[in-house]
Image: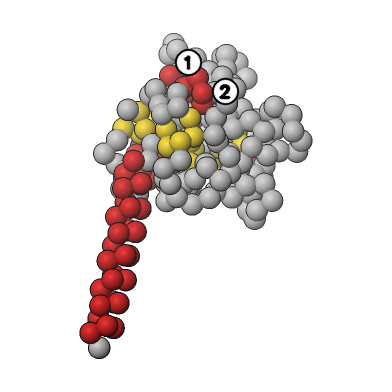
Amino acid sequence: MKRSVGMKLALAGALLLVGAQAGAQQGAMSFFVTSTGNGKGADFGGIDGADRHCQTLAAAAGAGSKAWRAYLSTQAAGGKPAINARDRIGAGPWQNAKGVVIAASVAALHGENNLTKETALNEKGEVVNGRGDTPNQHDVLTGSQADGTAFAAGDDRTCGNWTKGAAEGAAMVGHHDRRGLDNSAPAISWNSSHPSRGGCSLDALKGSGGAGLLYCFAEK
């Protein structure tokens, strides 16, 4: 009887230790792919709304004490200058929910980073569906060029600076799983693979393998 009680106590202690370790990793998390969009396609009510989406999901995962920013660029419009995604996410390093470093700096993030399907986890520490999974959700909204800078004004690459969620417009997306139709640089790009097809609505994003997901970085 005593042995049985002792074993139960030991098991309970081990589970508490595992839970504490998991919580510590979540607290140290500084990068994730959102587990869900906001249900409105690419319309977040602007870039600030996208930041709030990142912040809300981070808080639910126990990492809300940090300032979170969506990796999104905007194009110059209405007298307002463009915003570069690379300039709004801090200096790094960044690690996922499992404690794996995905990039040590902004330069590394846009060079030889450690972003793969296995490391580009959501805020819960889960692998995000990629090419070959059902449904495919590897298109992540960025509105950015490969170096993390904004596109010039003209052709819409940000769904109206993240205010459009209908048929018109387009947004540049990246592939979090680094997989595409071939092995060309755009096809395997994490942040600048192709524009969304068919518009900015959730259905349009789903049509090419998306779900209105974002990359979120903690601004340290």
18 or 151: nearer the eye?
Answer: 18
1 or 2: mark nearer the eye = 2
Helix, strand or loop at mark 2 = loop
Task: State the residue at coordinates (70%, 27%).
Answer: 185
> Amino acid type of disc 1?
Ala
Which quarter of the picture shows residue 92? top left
Quadrant that contains the N terminus? bottom left
Q: Which mark is residue 82?
A: 1
> Amino acid type of disc 2?
Gly
Position in image of residue 96 (x %, y %): 44, 41
Which residue is disc 2 drawn over?
111
Q: Residues within 10 Å of mark 1 (few under 14, many from 20)?
A: some
Which quarter of the picture shows residue 32? top left
Quadrant that contains the C terminus? top left
Helix, strand or loop at mark 1 = loop
Task: State the residue at coordinates (62%, 47%).
Answer: 130
